[in-house]
Image (spheres, rainbow, N blue to C red):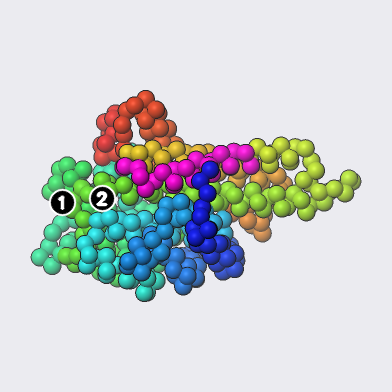
Amino acid sequence: MYELSAAQRRYVERVARITAEEIAPLAARYDSAGSNPVESWRALWREGFLGAAIPKAYGGLGLDMPTYVAVVRKLAGGCANTAMTVHMHSTVMRFIAALGTEAQKRKYFAAVADGGTLFGSWGSEPAVSLSRTFLMETTVRRHPDGWVVDGIKHFCTMALGAGYYLVWCALDGEPDMAKGLLQVLVPASTPGVETDGKWNTLGMRATFSPSVKLNRCLVGKDAALGTPGAATTVGVVEGFGLGYAAIYLGIAEAALEFAVDYAKKRIVRPDNVPVAHDPTVQRHVGELRARLDAALLVLAEAAAAWEAADMVQRGFLANKAKYLATEVGLDVTSKVIQVVGGRGAYRDYPVERAFRDLRTATLMPPTVDRMLEAIGKSALGIETAMFRFGSGPQGA
């Protein structure tokens, strides 16, 4: 298994301390309120972690993928919502690093490093499944003063919380989606950005991701990121899946750790011995630990191979890691409630929230069917990307 160096471990230890002292204690409150975890973001900003994916030359930490994945895992164990929002933000930073001009990098990276600004990524739409296609209905057209964005986005993470939103658009008048997909950075204060703020979900409640309407939103000439069609060619979009896998396993790890600690301390009568002495509990814990370790190994290997991998290889690595993390994470967070017993259903215990967050977070694309299809194609020697531009049998 890939081992982090001493320098890499120091980043993980730092985020572990912040998570335990400042972020985990706020998780239940943000979950209950269904609001953006602003205080948690500020704590991470003070320690530089909002710049995890920003190159060091621009004031960021410039974490490599193994370190980044380990940091996100640790963060997810304390607050899944904070981890998810920071991962979405960090992936936008990777897009800016890959596609941005020098002026864009200086502007947007400084907003994060100096001002603690968050960036959301909005791709989902009412009639679009991102597991099947990148066909966008939200449009962007050129304007003498910049760009105009029109459309409706669903699951708009960090709405009313981030300073900028990376909106995935179709270039107006371009019939080929592969050539017309364009990312536009829309400031949150832009006139025409409207939401009803409805976000009342099973889990991941503090990601605050309501639907948003963008009505003739005029943004500057420097708002478009890269050239049309470039966003899916730089090996960044695949990182969404790898980060999701880290979050799922971070949630599951924390849930299992809680259940193990509970089983050691919970004394039952008439034997007056800990629940941990029950052979059934031991079998449950043994199975979950073994499966979790296997999924963590695949995640670590994927992260270690990431830098040298091309776009197609990254898709394969992310699909494997996300598939296993999904299946194992759902199993772990469900069965730890059984280990804890009836008390596990109480909101006083974190395993209930872990179950809800994991069940909701694993709905993020690509779906299990799409991941297995892509993994199978790779095994059969059929090259395929992680996401599609159309509905044909081979994908894009």
> Residue placed at 71% from the left, 37% from the top?
283
Task: State the separation of the CA atoms marked 1 and 2.
Answer: 17 Å
Can residue 113 be seen? yes
Disc 2 residue crowd, few under 14, some 14–19, many 20+, Cα 10 Å:
many
> Is 307 part of what is drawn in magenta?
yes
Disc 1 residue crowd, few under 14, some 14–19, many 20+, Cα 10 Å:
some
Instruction: Specify whether 325 is left or right of 109.
Output: right
Residue 394 lies, in percent from the top left, at: 28, 30
Can residue 219 be seen? no
Instruction: Specify whether 95 is left or right of 141.
Output: right
Between residue 331 and residue 15, name the one nearer to us. 15
Task: Pick the quarter of the image with the C terminus.
Answer: top left
Residue that sits furthest to the right in the current view: 270
Q: Tell me the amino acid under the disc marked 1.
A: Asp
Residue that sits furthest to the top in the current view: 380
Question: What mark, if any, has residue 121 been given in the picture?
Answer: none
Residue that sits furthest to the front in the current view: 6
Residue that sits furthest to the left in the current view: 144
